[in-house]
Image (cartoon, helix red, strand yellow):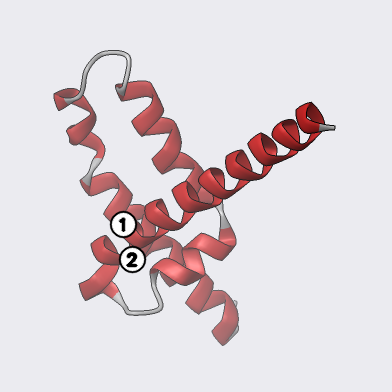
Amino acid sequence: MEVDQNEQNENGNVDILSKEIESWKDFSYALRKEDAPLFSKMFSEYGRNKDYIRAAVCKGQNYSAESLFILLVVQQQKMINELISKVSKCENLQNE
């Protein structure tokens, strides 16, 4: 059975990110007990997100760690922005 080029790229992309995530798996043992599950959950979520998979491999295998770190920073910034928005809405409601 022949695999089309897009499917090959997608599978290769998943492999690059999966390998990078797998290489960090043992790091969770160095974390505090309560932080390890969060670390594992965070990385497993990135490994399943197709947008993150595409973004993480845009630079190729040699930059997979850097791409993963950028994804972490972007995700954190998104959460910060959401929290700021929620706090602003609460402050506006209190001022009314």
Image coordinates for residue 25, horizontal then vertical, percent: 25, 37
Identify the element where label 1 is drawn: helix
In which quarter of the view is residue 24 placed?
top left
Q: Is residue 28 left or right of residue 96?
A: left
Quarter of the image for the N terminus: give it: bottom right
Q: Label 1, on which residue?
A: 69
Quarter of the image for the C terminus: give it: top right
Residue at the farthest front position:
95
- Amino acid type, residue under disc 1 in the picture: Phe
**On screen, 44 above or below 78?**
above
Q: Label 2, on which residue?
A: 67
Q: Is residue 27 left or right of residue 77?
A: left
Residue at the farthest top position:
33
| Residues at marks 1 and 2, CA–CA distance in whole angstroms | 5 Å
Residue at the farthest bottom position:
5
Identify the element where label 2 is drawn: helix
Q: Say if mark 1 contacts mark 2, CB within 8 Å.
A: yes
- Amino acid type, residue under disc 2 in the picture: Ser
**On screen, 55 above or below 71?**
below
